[in-house]
Image (spheres, rainbow, N blue to C red):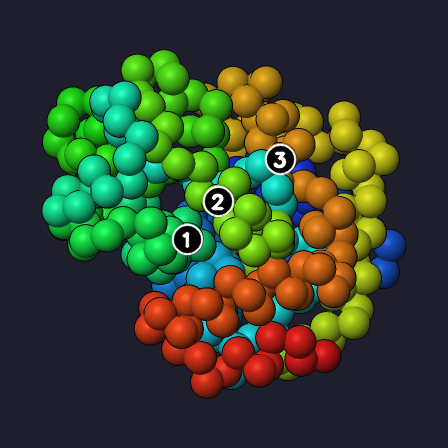
Amino acid sequence: MKIAYSPCPNDTFVFHALTHGLIEGAPSFGVTYADIDVTNHLAINGDPDKHDVLKISFAALPWVLEDYTLLSCGGALGRGCGPLVLTANDENNPNDLEGKRVAVPSERSTAYLLFRLWTAQQVEGNIGDVVVMPFHEIMPAVQNGDVDAGLVIHEARFTYQNYGLNKLVDLGDWWEKDTGYAIPLGAIIARRSVDREALTGWIKQSVDYAWERPEASKEYVRFHAQEMDEEVAQNHIDLYVNGFTKELGEEGYGAVEAFLGRAAKEGLVPGHQLQRLRDR
C-alpha cells in the first residue's frame, strides 16, 4: 500500500511500526514524506501516485469526501495545541489586526480556518492582506516587520519567544473556550476502495506499539525531524499524539462536525459533503 504523511515527529512516531513491518498481518507500505499542503493538494486536485492513505488537514476534508473516507484513528486532535497569532508588539487587542498584513502557512488549513473564524467573531473590521509563506519563514517575517502578524503552527509554539514576539491569541485556547471541543488538526483519510476496517485496526496497533515502545521509533523520528531539538520533538509528540489519535470517538467526531459546520456557515468550505464525515 502507499501512504503519505509529514516528516513531523507526531506522524513518524505514530506510523513507525506500521511502515516498518512491525504490525502482524499488515501489508508493506511505501511511504511518501510530504508537507500537509502537498497532501492536501494531492487529495483535492488529484494524486498521480494513487496513495491509498494520506494525512491531510481537517480543513481540506470537505473537498475530498466523495473519493476518500475519514479514518477514526491516526490523526491529531487535542487541547492546548492550537495555532498562535503572533505580533512584534505588546498589543493584545484583536481589533489591531484591522487592515493589517498577516502571514499564514496555508489558506486551506485548520490553522487558517480557525484564524478566519476567530477574526469573524473578534475583529470588528476586516484584516488586510493575507500572505501565504512557508511556516518556518513566518516568525522572521513578523520580527523584521515584513508583515504585521503571523499565524504559526507546530514547534513555533515553543520557540516564538526566541524571536521576541508576542502572542496575540492562542486559537486553540479560544476554540476550546468557545465550543468546549478539542481542536481538529490533522486527519487520516483512505481511498474508499481500501478495506477501512482492516486499515483502522493496523493503525491502532501502530499507535499502541509507539506508546508501549517509545524507544523503538526514536531514531526514525530524530532522522526525519532533521534539525529540530530532541526536547522540542518530544514536546511535539506529547501535544499531538493522544487518545484522539487512537480513536476519535463521539467527542472527536463532534469536534470535527462543529469546526467544519461553522466554517461552512461562514462560506469558508463547501458543506454539501459533510454528512459523509461518519461514513463507515
Residue matched to label 1: 114
* Residue 191 occupies quadrant: bottom right
- The mark nearer the N terminus, 2 or 3, is 2
* Secondary structure at numbered mark 2: helix
- The mark nearer the N terminus, 1 or 2, is 1
Q: Residue at x 62, y 54 (%)?
A: 181
Question: What number is the disc on residue 239?
Answer: 3
How far is disc 2 from disc 3 in space, using C-alphas? 17 Å
Give the quadrant of the N terminus.
Answer: bottom right
* Residue 92 occupies quadrant: top left
Query: Camera-side residue: 227 or 175?
Result: 175
Q: Are marks 1 and 3 in contact (CB under 8 Å)?
A: no
User: Can residue 185 be seen in the rendering of this structure?
Assistant: no
Give the quadrant of the C terminus.
Answer: bottom right
Q: Are marks 1 and 2 in contact (CB under 8 Å)?
A: yes
Q: Residue at x 23, y 22 (%)?
A: 89
Q: Disc 1 vs disc 2: which is toward the camera?
A: 2
* Residue 197 occupies quadrant: bottom right
Q: Amino acid at mark 2?
A: Trp
Q: Disc 2 vs disc 3: which is toward the camera?
A: 2
Query: Camera-side residue: 36 or 195?
Result: 36
* Secondary structure at numbered mark 1: helix
Q: Amino acid at mark 1?
A: Leu
Query: Camera-side residue: 170 or 186?
Result: 170
Q: Is residue 162 above or below residue 275?
A: above
Q: Amino acid at mark 3?
A: Leu
Residue matched to label 2: 174
